Image (cartoon, rainbow, N blue to C red):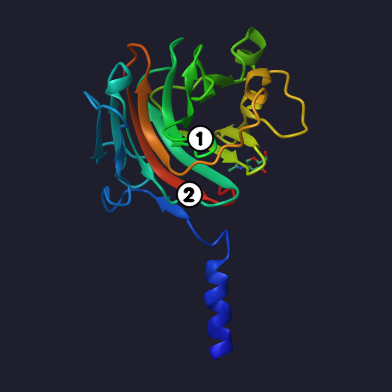
Amino acid sequence: MLRQGALLALLALLPGSIAQVSEGFENGLDTAAWPTYAPDCSQGGSVALDSTQAHSGKNSVKVNGAGGYCGHIFFGTTKVPSGDIYVRTWLKASKALTDSHVTFITMPDAAQGAKKHLRIGGQSKILMYNRETDDATLPDLSPNGIAASKALPANAWQCFEYHLGPDGTVETWLNNVTIAGLTVKPGTANANAAQWQRSTVKPKPTAIYFGWESYGGDTNTFWYDDISVSSTRVGC
Ligand SMILES: *[C@@H]1O[C@H](CO)[C@@H](O)[C@H](O)[C@H]1NC(C)=O
């Protein structure tokens, strides 16, 4: 019995069985588990539980994002698996992405250094990643790069998923369909990832925050629901 107990205790410590997060906010927004995040300044943005919008159940989290960098606000989790990281969120944006650069998921990235982030957002009307240290985008914002990504449909719930691998792999899916332009694998050519691959930084996020940050005047309202952070892909 003792031995079996010890084995079970050991299994519970194995990577893959820790840092799993799955939350639909049906019991509210626990601000200890889901702290707000607005580095440097916070003017105009807000995060709140919303019982009028939901992907499933009755609740979601509503982010009112204001314009300008200081209008940013996020909420999220520091429970990030070591190794492979798979994030799935259902999200709904009230407005389509414009030509301006914005972020709706930001991750403090230990690989880039203090106060630097790996960001997921939009520019040139399509979904893209941005690496704060060198401002590289994935995909390149060339006509071919833009065509290899997708727009984010507004005013309807979308299933957004991504994978960050310890080897620098990035994979992204919208409604279970791979976004080719938002995919990078070591050793695999991606003609639209020239900017991204000029650096050897392999993202190592210490937290995952959902919200809104705008570097121009764009404002938006996002709802997030049914968030999963896991070491394996959970799907939509
Ligand atoms: C998602 O896509 C994969 C392969 O592309 C497929 O096997 C799977 O059934 C899809 N899942 C859903 C929920 O559609």
Quick check: can you spot residue 55?
A: no
Residue 214's image quarter?
A: top left
Residue 66 image offset from top left, x and y in percent: 27, 20
Indicate left or right for 130 with 166 as reference.
Answer: left
Residue 59 image offset from top left, x and y in percent: 29, 44
Depth check: give the residue in front, 67 or 95.
67
Q: Residues within 10 Å of mark 1 (few under 14, many from 20)?
A: many
Depth check: give the residue in front, 64 or 215.
215
In this view, which residue lies farthest toward the front?
114
Quick check: can you spot residue 87?
A: yes
How many angstroms separate mark 2 from mark 1 (CA)?
17 Å
Q: Looking at the picture, does residue 133 appear above or below residue 49?
A: above
Q: Name the residue beneath numbered marker 1.
A: 160
Amino acid carrying label 2: it is: Val
Q: Name the residue beneath numbered marker 2.
A: 80
Amino acid carrying label 1: it is: Phe
The disc, 2 or 1, on the residue closer to the chain's N-terminal end is 2
Residue 14 image offset from top left, x and y in percent: 58, 65
